[in-house]
Amino acid sequence: MSMEIVGRGFLAVNLRPIADRHPETVALAAGVSWAAGTSDADFAREADLLEEVAARCVATGRRLLFFSTAATGMYGAVDGPGREDSPITPATPYGAHKLALEQRLRASGADHLILRLGHLVGPGQPPHQLIPALVRQMRAGSVRIQREAARDLIDVADVIAVIDRLLSQDLHGETVNVASGAAVPVEHIVDHLERRLGLEVHRDYEDAGAHHVISIEKLNALVPETAAMGFGPDYHRRVLDAFIASTAATSAR
């Protein structure tokens, strides 16, 4: 028996290599992943799926791995770095939805581990997500930037390594931020992509966006291996370089 992975998308595919190591876990890697393109119907479908999978975990005694968000929708209104125990007022409908699902999971009686994720980056991610969308806009010659927007980028390979380590521990009912801990202005992300792609693009600025920092103090304590992952103010450059290299390799096939 191996870990049951509910879902077939970007995160689900990346979880497959560690599935055999965690047979006691059911990973719910399906549902709403697009904060800007959701509807009440999408939210309801994910809530129903969570109820179904949680009930199954209660019946079988398996642990449910649930993926929430550490992005602006969750921590955008928090004073200071967003911690797992911070009082939260969700800043978007998406954030409110994910927080409500966390609460429903805790009330379900299912053994669980909740991971609040930063912005995952890696080969094969959906085109609507931040980095593929930025690259597509830039290749078309123009990019839209919110002046106050910042994002915490983390390589999906590092996320999977962290998940593997967390699932190997005796964690029950815990909530853990999985991010790099660095809030990178979107303009700086565009700067780096522009240099690496050899482009010179027009920038349309909007006086909008939110800047928040995700605390990874708990993550670092639980997974000391993060010290070797290079998290910090320059980490995003390596993440972006790896993404560009992977898409170039795919295009060359």
Image (cartoon, grey):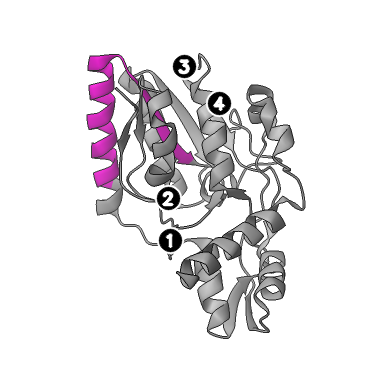
Q: Which residue is mark 2?
A: 94
Alpha-carbon distance for marks 4 and 3? Answer: 14 Å
Element at badge 3?
A: loop
Please identify, in this view, whether the residue under mark 3 or under mark 1 is nearer the observer: 3
Callout 2 touching callout 4 (CB < 8 Å): no
Mark 2 and mark 1 in contact (Cβ < 8 Å)?
Answer: yes
Q: Label 4 is placed on what type of residue?
A: Arg
Q: Main secondary structure of the magenta part?
A: helix
Quick check: 34 left or right of 207?
left
Sort mark 1 into few (<14), some (14-19) or many (20+) by Cα contacts within 10 Å.
few
Crowd around label 2: few <14 · some 14–19 · many ≥20 (10 Å) = many
Using the image as rendered, state which of residue 122 and residue 146 is in the foreground.
122
Vertically, is 218 above or below 141?
above
Q: Which part of the image, by quadrant, shows the C terminus?
A: bottom left
Residue type for callout 2: Tyr
Residue found 64% across the figure and 72% down from its top: 207
Secondary structure beneath disc 4? helix
Q: Earlier in the sequence, mark 4 or mark 3?
A: 4
Query: Whole-percent x and y of residue 247?
Result: 52, 65
Q: Nearer the viewer, residue 1 or 11?
A: 1
Above or below, comparing residue 91 to residue 147 in the picture: above
Cα–Cα gap, marks 4 and 1: 31 Å
Would you name the residue on which mark 4 appears? Answer: 165
Report the quarter where the N terminus lies: top left
Q: Helix or strand or loop: what does disc 2 sit on?
A: helix
Q: Which residue is mark 1?
A: 36
Q: Which residue is mark 3?
A: 172
What kind of residue is marked 3? His
Cα–Cα gap, marks 2 and 4: 28 Å
